[in-house]
Image (cartoon, rainbow, N blue to C red):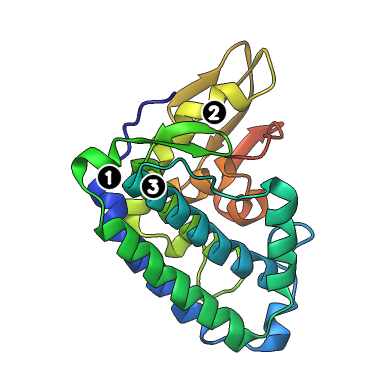
Amino acid sequence: MTTSTYDLPAAVANVPLAQERFAGTLATLTDSDLREPSVLPGWTRGHVIAHVARGAEAMVRLIDGVLTQRPAEAYPGGPAVRDAEIELGAQSGANELMDEVYETNLKIVYAFARMTAPTWGRQVQFPTGAYPANRCAWSRWREVEIHHVDLGLDVYTIESWPDEFVACHLPHELAKLPGRLPPGTAVQVGPSRFGTGEVVATIDGPDSAVLAWVLGRVGLAAPALATTGNLPELPPWS
C-alpha cells in the first residue's frame, strides 16, 4: 500500500484543460495522419490516441469502484486484453477516434466531480500496485500531457507543456531516478546528484527537457539538453 503526496487540486483542475488541448490537436488530424509513426516505437499516432481513450476508461472504472466500494480492475482481462483493445482502436478513422476521446474525456471529468475528500483517500488497484484514488487524477494529467507530445507533431511539443505541469511532475520523477539508474551509477542533473557511485554523466537544460529525458523521451529532450559523459539508458517509466 502506498501513500500519496500528489497535488490533488492541481491535477483535478488541469485534467480537463489538458484533455481539451489534446482533443483540439486531434480535431486537425486526418485518417492518414493517424497511420503515421508516433514517438513511441511500434506505435502509430492512432495507437497513442486509442491508448489515451482506453486509459480514461480505466480511471473511470477505478473511480466507480471507489464510489460503490466494490474493488475494480483498471484493465479487466489484463495486459493482453488491454493491448488488443488498443490495437483495434488504432485502426479506427479520425472521426471515430475523436468521438471516443471526446466521450471518454467527459466521463472522466464527471467521475472526478463525484469524488469527495474521503473517497479520494480510498485505495485503488493500479497495475503497478495499490494507491490512494487521488493518483487517478495525477495519472490522467500526466498521461494526457505526455502522450500529447508522443504524437510527434510540431503543434504540441515538450516546450508546450504548461509550467505547472512540469513544476508538479519533475520533482516526483527525479525522486524516482536513483532507483531507475544502473547499480553503482550516479548522474548530475543541474546542481543535484542522483544515484550512488561514480557520476557517469551530467545533464543540464530547461526543466521540460529534463522531464522528457527522465520520462524516456530522449529524442524529444536531446536538442535542448547539454550533456557530458554517457547518459545511462533508463527503464520504462511508470
Q: Is residue 188 above or below residue 107?
A: above
**Residue 166 in view in this figure:** no
Pointer 1: what residue?
8
Q: Which tag, 1 or 3, sits closer to the chain's start?
A: 1
Q: Of the residues shown, which amino acid type is indicated by label 3?
A: Trp
Q: Residues within 10 Å of mark 3 (few under 14, many from 20)?
A: many
Across and down, in percent, residue 4 comes to: 34, 31
Q: Does residue 116 appear to the left or right of 106 in the view shown?
A: left
Answer whether labels 3 and 2 touch (C-beta < 8 Å): no
Q: Which tag, 1 or 2, sits closer to the chain's start?
A: 1
Q: Which mark is residue 177?
A: 2
Q: Does residue 9 appear to the left or right of 145 in the view shown?
A: left
Pointer 3: what residue?
138
Answer whether labels 1 and 3 touch (C-beta < 8 Å): yes
Q: Of the residues shown, which amino acid type is indicated by label 1?
A: Leu
Q: Secondary structure at mark 1?
A: helix
Q: Secondary structure at mark 3?
A: helix
Across and down, in percent, residue 87 comes to: 74, 66
Answer whether labels 1 and 2 touch (C-beta < 8 Å): no
Closest to the camera, between mark 3 and mark 2, is 3
**Residue 69 in view in this figure:** yes
Across and down, in percent, residue 224 comes to: 55, 53
- Front position in the image: 66 or 5: 66
Q: How many marks?
A: 3
Quarter of the image that includes the N terminus: top left
Q: What is the spatial separation of the Cα atoms under label 1 and label 3, in whole angstroms?
A: 7 Å
Q: Residues within 10 Å of mark 2 (few under 14, many from 20)?
A: some
Q: Is residue 229 above or below residue 32?
A: above
Q: Residues within 10 Å of mark 1 (few under 14, many from 20)?
A: some
Q: What is the spatial separation of the Cα atoms under label 3 and label 2, in whole angstroms?
A: 19 Å
Q: Of the residues shown, which amino acid type is indicated by label 2?
A: Leu
